[in-house]
Structure formats: C-alpha cells, structure tokens
Amino acid sequence: MATQARWHNKTFEITPSKVMTISGFSTSYKLKSDTNDDTSGTKKTNTRGREPEEPSFSVKYLAAVGATPRNDFTGWRALVGKKDYLYIGKTKYGTHKFELISADVSDVLLDNKGRTMQAVVTLRFREVLPTKKSKSKTGSSSKSKSKNKGSKSQAKSAKASKTDKKLKSPYGTGRKKTKS
C-alpha cells in the first residue's frame, strides 16, 4: 500500500483493491502588498507579508479500480470549509492547516443504468495563516482582561490588594473599625 497524500479523513493511495491518486498538483507563493498613490503622483508599495498559499490537485475516481465515484465526490461536499493538515507522502506539507475552499466535479461518466463510473474532483485549498493580534491604544484591552476568568493557577497565585487587606471579610462587607 502506497499513500500519495492525505487530508482530513481522506487518503489518496494505491492498494491492490483501490487506486486513488492525485494529479496536477499546483500552488503559488505571493507577497501581500498594498499600492497607494501619494500626492506627488509616484506609487508607493507597502509589503505586508505573504498571501496564503492555495494548493490544488485533481483526483480521478474510477469504479473499475475500486472507487465509488458518486459516493466519493458527494463526500467532498461535506468537507468544504473544513481545516486540517495536508500530507504529501509521509511529510506534512507546510506548517499550517489548509482549508478546503472548493471541490469541483467534472468528467462524470455514467453507464447505461445511470450509475457513475468515473468522476474527476478538483480540490482547492487555502492555507490558514495565524492572525496577528493588534495592540489597543485606548487601554480598553486591560478592562476586557479583568472581565475574563483566569485559570486556577492564576487564582492561586493572586495577591490581595491594599483595599482587600483592610477589609475583615473577603466579600467586602464590614470594615475594620478605626479610632475616631
């Protein structure tokens, strides 16, 4: 058994009873850039990193070599939008997950009873790049952090504030009596 590629729960392999191979693998690498016109009329290009990679390949499903073309191509419909790692051979392709953005069916061949004997499915993926978190300039992020629940270890290592130390009860009721 030789595995050519795999993604999510789909395996493209060659076995004595089934042949499902990929063909026409292609991808491209592009820079992400913005082009702006400034007041002097010259264009200014700002490079903003790398565009997500979009690999694609085709799979030919043939009933004669163990595939069930109709079940195979309809199974891809449920996977559009799913994200997982792509493996070519035994090696993970890239470092990020890939989202299935389309599954195009073509070259469908039916027999005289309407059974699907052949189908070619072209799969297009988009790399899922991590998003950069922007820093807030207004300071509202510190307010939102205080509303979020912390972990158990953060709670155990928490220190009481000066106001809390002055209170008898940890619930804020009853202050220490001061001399008047």
Image: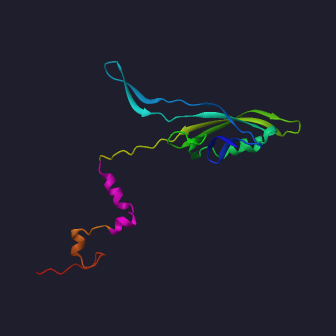
In the drawing, does residue 83 fall left or right of residue 137?
Answer: right
Residue 150 belongs to magenta span: yes
In depth, the one of 18 and 129 nearer the eye is 18
In what quadrant of the picture does the N terminus appear? Answer: top right
In depth, the one of 138 and 26 nearer the eye is 26
Residue bounds of the magenta highlight: 138-156
Image position, residue 104 (x, y; %): 67, 35
Q: Residue at x 26, y 69 (%)?
A: 160
Q: Tag count in the figure?
A: 0
Q: In this rendering, is residue 22 above or below 167? A: above
Q: Of helix, strand and loop, which mostly describes the magenta segment?
A: helix
Q: Residue at x 47, y 33 (%)?
A: 51
In the drawing, does residue 14 fall left or right of residue 148?
Answer: right
In the drawing, does residue 177 fall left or right of residue 120?
Answer: left
In depth, the one of 27 and 159 nearer the eye is 27
Image position, residue 71 (x, y; %): 75, 45
In what quadrant of the picture does the C terminus appear? Answer: bottom left
